Image (tube, helix red, strand yellow):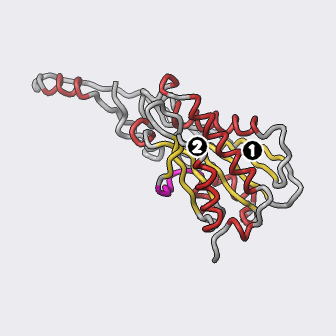
Amino acid sequence: STNRLVEDWEFHLPSATLPAESGLALLSRPQGLVQLRLRTEQRPGETCNVVGRRAGSRHESAVACAHFDTKFDTPGAADNASGVAALLALAELLRGERLDCGLEFVAFTNEEYLPIGEDAYIPAAGEGHFERLLLAVNFDGLGHRLDALTLASFACSPAFQARLESLSAAHPGAQWTEPWPESNHSSFAWRGVPAAALSGQAVRTWAHQRHDSLRWVNPAVVREAAELAAEILREVQSRSLAWLRPEA
């Protein structure tokens, strides 16, 4: 098997990717005649975000999110079934707790292919919604058995950053990494909302591959991501926007 070279949904011409071994076999027979027929079809479709909300005692709220789509030709276990599992585990952990802030759980569609789910979420929520958000926590690409849990922060005040580092210190399996933009948290951080992304380094190698299967996912890491996110949300529930956000 091989991974397709062309996977851009906006590329309308039918295409095929030949495995290297097959290409070598053809090159060894330069006088042969090869015919290829592609039976393809392109048609419009519909998809949607899945959003669940729970009110708190204050007007502000926090968001936890993960994208539920994946690339073509891959099971998508670590990118991003594990992220969705962490999101659901977080909801279960907080089910019996009443936090001061509201909670919003978002399973985003189309993170891998345009148009991204935020193209529907943002107009529906309104830009004013982001002015009332305490935090966005994103789960994407975590839980590979040969990897550690990583944590990156965005648009956080120095005081909040210090608190995040203190909370994560109780999770030796979690490692800090440099901020990275390629996921749903950026739609919040670029609007000034403090954000935390829980992920892993192995996703850079394993994501979008045919072998991104469930046997390579470590449930303990998924659970740890949910537990760390729950601790972060408990921390921010009563904090002011001014304390969480960096000075303008």
Residue 51: numbered disc: 1
Q: Which residue is mark 2?
A: 171
Range of magenta residues: 178-184
Q: Is disc 1 placed on a helix, strand or loop?
A: strand
CA gap, disc 1 and disc 2: 29 Å
Answer few, some or many: residues within 10 Å of disc 2's Cα (few below 14, many 20 plus, some between 14 and 19).
some
Q: Callout 1: few (<14), some (14-19), or many (20+) C-alpha neighbours within 10 Å? A: few
Residue 179 shown in magenta:
yes
The residue lying at 80 percent from left, 46 percent from top is 53
Which residue is rendered at x = 84% and y = 38% of the image? 96
Along the line of sight, the residue nearer the viewer: 32 or 199? 199
> Across the whole image, how many numbered discs are drawn on residues?
2
In front of the other: 215 or 80: 215
Q: Residue 133: image x %, image y %?
A: 73, 60
Q: Main secondary structure of the magenta part?
A: loop
Q: Amino acid at mark 1?
A: Val
Q: Name which quarter of the figure residue 153 lies in.
A: bottom right
**Of 6 and 162, the residue lying toward us:** 162
From the top left corner, tell me how far across and down residue 103 is, in percent: 78, 49
Q: Is residue 94 visible?
A: yes
Would residue 3 be counted in the magenta stretch? no
